[in-house]
Amino acid sequence: MELAWLLILAGALMIPGTSFGDSVHYLTKGIGSTHGALPFVIYTLIFLGFGFKAAIFPFGQLWLPDAHSIAPSPISALLSGVMIKTGVYGIIRTFFWMTPHSEAFHFNGLFWGAVIATFGVVTLFIGTVQSVKQSQSKRLLAYSSIGQIGYIIFGIGAALYMFSSASPFLKLLSLVAIVGAIYHVLNHAIFKGLLFLTSGSVLYSTGSKDLNKLGGLINLMPVTAVIAGIASLSISGVPPFSGFASKWTLVSSSILGGSETLFLVIFGIIALFTSAVTLACYVKFFGMTFTSSGSEWSFDEEIKEAPWGMLLPKLVLTALCIVQGLIPYFYFSTIISIFQNSGGSMLSAAFANVRLQDYIFSSLMGVSLRIPGLQSGIAAAAFPAVVLIVFAAAFVLARLIRNSAGSKERQAPTWLCGYQDLHDKTRYRDRSMFAAFKNALWWTGGNVKE
């Protein structure tokens, strides 16, 4: 963290005439008087400093997993939910507010947007793949935080690039992308804080963070298991939970923008694929903690549910994961209002434009676009409840078909691949889950030694 602030201060103090305590407005005015390579150096140092705090690749790998693994779980929740977001805030303030409007200064938004988006997409992919490889719960969640920050940084970069283009279509999409990025900041603070607190409850009851020692806790800690399941679905972007609304906004805006800029659609596809990797990661986290066998051979003492004093805050966060997924339009409207009422940003005028509501609007379908010349609008964030209704209807239909033939269920012992009995030596370990996938992506780092 000291290095991060040194980079930020070095960049700020390189602005002519600046000193400690100067306002952002004064710093922006100072940047406007610079020429040549100096503004590039200033923006680079500030971006690297805030990127270090935000835990983007490769800086996040240097400190975040170790910090999370030794910190108490409530502190880990604050680290992931609040502290690393200060770096995100700094990047947004720098590249959307500290951009001089003088004719003598040219801010290359296309260049910086592409750079930031590239850092974001590399961060989301590498961080998420590394999280799948972890066998300790808090290190898994820490690497996953790096991946989720990548989504936010990617959205910021894509928004900056599209807004700096000459295309009116891309400018409209940029507003959708930045709304999705801000919304994912809020969503990640909720569901990742919840996941760390859940991991803390498991540690409190079992004394272990090792996924290879856990398992079967769904019967022993049922409330914690339900909470962890909802948080896992949220971070994986499964509708109707909160992560779906923000991730789909980011992915859809970049894919739509790919009609005019090829790299955006490639980045959007990578982000969409990485969401599937995130789901695999949390299948592992939830499965090895709650649904597989293992704890019966690892712990001699009786395992009990966490006290209600620990559960109540988690239940509040769990409710937010559901609410933020079911009514994203409320949060989208709030974020749009914030930009409309905040002066000094390059986006303020676009969001405050009275005609903007003719093209971009927030409704029950999330954030939508109406493009001139098209008969129907383009929804950039689908209404999760619609997807939930489709899933519920499919489930009911499947049950009707299943019961229509009068078939009966019967229970049989689990086939153990030739082993006679299930015990500690024959159960699945961390190394067995997604082994081929992890071996194929060994080059991404984060590999855990056997």
Image (cartoon, rainbow, N blue to C red):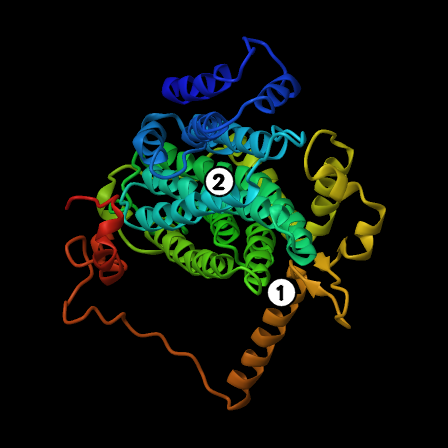
Residue named by callout 1: 388
Residue at 65% of width from left, 56% of height from top?
167
Residue named by callout 2: 192
Is residue 224 in view? no
Q: Is residue 359 left or right of residue 125?
A: right
The amino acid type, in three-letter code, at marker 2 is Lys
Q: Is residue 247 left or right of residue 354?
A: left
Q: Which mark is residue 173?
A: none
Is residue 357 in view? yes
Name the outermost residue toward the top. 20
Q: CA distance from mark 1 to mark 2?
A: 23 Å
Height in image: 425 above or below 110? below
The picture places residue 234, in percent across and down from the top left corner, at 53, 51
> Closest to the observer: 401 or 302?
401
The picture places residue 51, in percent across and down from the top left corner, at 44, 32
Whether the residues at callouts 1 and 2 have beta carbons within 8 Å, the answer is no
Residue at 34% of width from left, 43% of height from top?
140
The picture places residue 114, in percent across and down from the top left corner, at 48, 47
Q: Secondary structure at mark 2?
A: helix
Question: In which quarter of the view is residue 416 placed?
Answer: bottom left
Q: Quadrant of the N terminus?
A: top left
Name the outermost residue toward the right. 354
> Closest to the observer: 356 or 13?
13
Residue at 52% of width from left, 27% of height from top?
86
> Closest to the observer: 57 or 241?
57
Height in image: 248 above or below 304? below
Height in image: 54 above or below 333? above
Q: Is residue 239 left or right of residue 5?
A: right
The picture places residue 77, in percent across and down from the top left corner, at 47, 32
